Image (cartoon, rainbow, N blue to C red):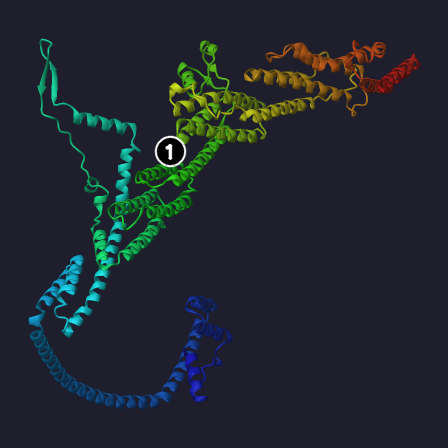
Amino acid sequence: MPNSSSTSQANITGSETASTSYVNYVEMSAEQEYFLYELETTDSGSMGLVLRAIYDTGDVQQFARALQQRISHYDKNIQKVCSFHYQSFVDAMQELMQLKEQCQDIKDETVQIDAEIQCISQRLCAKKQEIVRYRKLMKNAKTAMDQIAVCLPVLENYAKLQELMSNKKYYQALKTLEELEHTHLALVEKYRFTQVLAKSMTPVRLEIKDKAYSEFKDFLENIKKVAGRIGKHASKDTAEQHSFGVTDAERARKIQEEARKNASNVEIEVSADGSIVKKNVSPKRYPQAQVEDDEQVSAQDLIDFTPVHRCCQIFNVLGAKEEFEQYYRQQRREQCGLVIEPSHKMNNFKHYVEYLDEIVGFFVVEDQILMTQSNLSTAAEKDKLWDNALLKIRHHLDARFGGCPDVEMMLRMKKVILLFILTMKSYGYAVAPLYELLQNFRDQYNEILVKEYCAQFERDLDKDNYTPITVNSEEEFRAVIRQFPFYKRSMEQEPFPRKFPFSRFVISAYTQAKQYLIGCLKFMDNLQLNTSAVDDTVRRCANVLLGRWAGILKSFVYKRLSMIQLVQITINLGYLEKSCESLGAFITSKTSGEEAIGTTSHQVVLSEKVFRDVRSEVEQQIDECMRSKVDEIIELSNYDWELPAAAGQASDFITDLIKFLLTTFQSFTNLPSGLAKHVCTQTCKHISQSLSDLLLSPETKAISTGALDQFSLDVMQCEMFTTRCPVVGVDPQTLSMTFADLRQLLDLVMSSDWTTFNAEYGKDHAKYLRVKASTAIVVLEKMIEYERKSTGFFGIARGDRKRLLDTIVRQLKLLEIQ
């Protein structure tokens, strides 16, 4: 840039170059100077904005002249800088040309010297190699002539030894070495070379020993490679022996194949005259499935145990039998640790199967070695190795698979572990801890199942319509009967549509319970548990599920549910309790067979009491719901307590209340009789108490005779309802007694029968036995207050009326004190 050129020149010369600072010309305005400054300093992206501003000013020609002047000014500065530095540039180029000529001379001399050295070195190396070759020839010839006569047998045996070593026949080489040392070397031991040869035997022994170790390591590596295949075949043999994992269809197919193979080659026909004729026919050949090569051999045929036997023989000759035994055990312990340690990629079912197959293969090989080479390992050593491995196997399986949330994966893994147990047990290994592991998995599996079915139970609760099931045809009726054990003789004669007392939720819960029990039985299959243990375990699981469901129901009823929902839940609970017996029979049929139903005694019984707390809670909620609804209706009463005369009919809120009671109590048809009667009685008692509270409320200061008449008419409607209550089993006389207290109070006040009340108060046969003096005082004072407010109170005979009422109040207060 011009600015940077000026700065550089200023640093070199100090002051001789022209300055590149901006020079203001006479004809250049400040605005043009600003535009030039912006063009020189701004980036290319903003240049368009500057040019646009120049064109917007309109004086483009003047700006072009100013720009040309600025360009001319910079050209002059550049020429001055170039003129100043030109002589230095020429001098530098001349020095470089001189330096180039000197470098070329040095290079030519170096190449010439190198060529001379290379030529001399080649002649020297040739002489040296020739000298070495002649010396070797002389030495070899002299050694051969001196040794060949007396040492030919030694050399032959040594050559044989080398040949055997090169052919990796180490045991034969060791035998030749023994023969060479003890037989041939003794004849030529006076020669010095024999001593050297004798000393060379020790490295040969060490080499044979190292090669034996190497061969044994190769054997161990081979074991590691084929351990999975060996374990797979061993597990397959065990599965076939125990019919493990074979379905009924596969078992039937195998029986049919065996029957076809064993069938006689005789065909029987019936002749025209009815006699039986036998014909010999050629046997039919059925195509056989191709079998893989690996499946045609046993597990022991997959690996060659010759290296182990050869190593044992070699170390016996070397006198290092114990050393090899210790080495073998150490290597097997290390290899066992590697096999037991799972890989980091165990993230699917296949990896678990391969992991257990490798462990099976390892211990099958160990068992085979113990059978063929009992000196290498002992039964105690094998059991110790297995015990240590067993602890780690259990830990790894529990750690890597213990938190599995997938039920199907746990079932598959249970089968694999069970097959692993049976396989190891068939080879004599202790497997009790693995059964404990399966027990833990079973508890975890059952817990996962419980959570799944509890979640489904909650969903069924939320989506249930809480309406009795209605069927419109015989097919629908039979479908419901098949799904849930319900029997009612009269129902089959009823016309369609027919109604079941329970909702769809009951069928769903019963079906889910059976599926849960089937799921529990799947995990216990082939666990070698007796029928009683399986039965009791499944019953415990069923009790756990029912208990969890009861807890969910208990939490569910705390929600703001309608009366219809609460009533239907109570009915459903009753049928769920009754279904426990059918669930028990279902469990027995699955564990002991259909013929054992009703004959087997169980230590664990399905508990029908798990829903008792829920039932109590629902009943309490029904009571509270009824009281709440009654309170809502009574709050709408809006009595005019100074009504001059009764309306001649019941109040609107009483009519609504009775309609509500009729509708609600009619829905109690399928409720338990005791609960329905209890709710009905408690509701009538609450109505009576609420009406009494309304009459005796402190907010009501005065009551007219007309208001009392209307209130009495409303109470009479309630009493009439008790005589025609739709709840079956309720005694109308007993139910009407709930309003007896209120009725006697109203009769006493309205008839002013104070003389009888005072005379019989406190006696068992009193007419107004249920009326308390304090209650009568409250109502009477409210009536007196109304008469005091009325205009006719101080009319004719007002003194007598006032004195009479005051006397009655004083008498009632005396009775209250007694």
Q: Residue furthest right?
A: 799
> In which quadrant of the rendered image does the N terminus lie?
bottom left
The residue indicated by pointer 1 is 527
Q: Secondary structure at mark 1?
A: loop
Q: Is residue 780 left or right of residue 713?
A: right
Q: Is residue 118 left or right of residue 733?
A: left
User: Where does residue 334 sit, x and y in percent of width and height?
Assistant: 33, 53
How many badges with numbers are in the image? 1
**Which of the 4 image quadrants contains residue 297?**
top left
Mark 1 crowdedness (10 Å alpha carbons): few <14, some 14-19, many ≥20: some
Q: Residue at x 27, y 34 (%)?
A: 240
* Vertical side of 807 occupied by 603: above or below: below
Closer to the camera in the image, 24 or 43 = 43
Whether residue 717 is visible, yes or no, is no
Amino acid type at image mark 1: Leu
Whether residue 470 is visible, yes or no, is yes
User: Where does residue 605 sit, x and y in percent of width and height?
Assistant: 49, 24
Closer to the camera in the image, 653 or 805 = 805
Closer to the camera in the image, 793 or 510 = 510
User: Where does residue 551 sit, x and y in percent of width and height?
Assistant: 54, 31
* Vertical side of 266 occupied by 720: above or below: above
> In which quadrant of the rendered image does the C terminus lie?
top right
**Which of the 4 image quadrants contains residue 218?**
bottom left
**Which of the 4 image quadrants contains residue 119?**
bottom left
* Vertical side of 4 occupied by 599: above or below: above
User: Where does residue 425 sit, x and y in percent of width and height?
Assistant: 33, 39
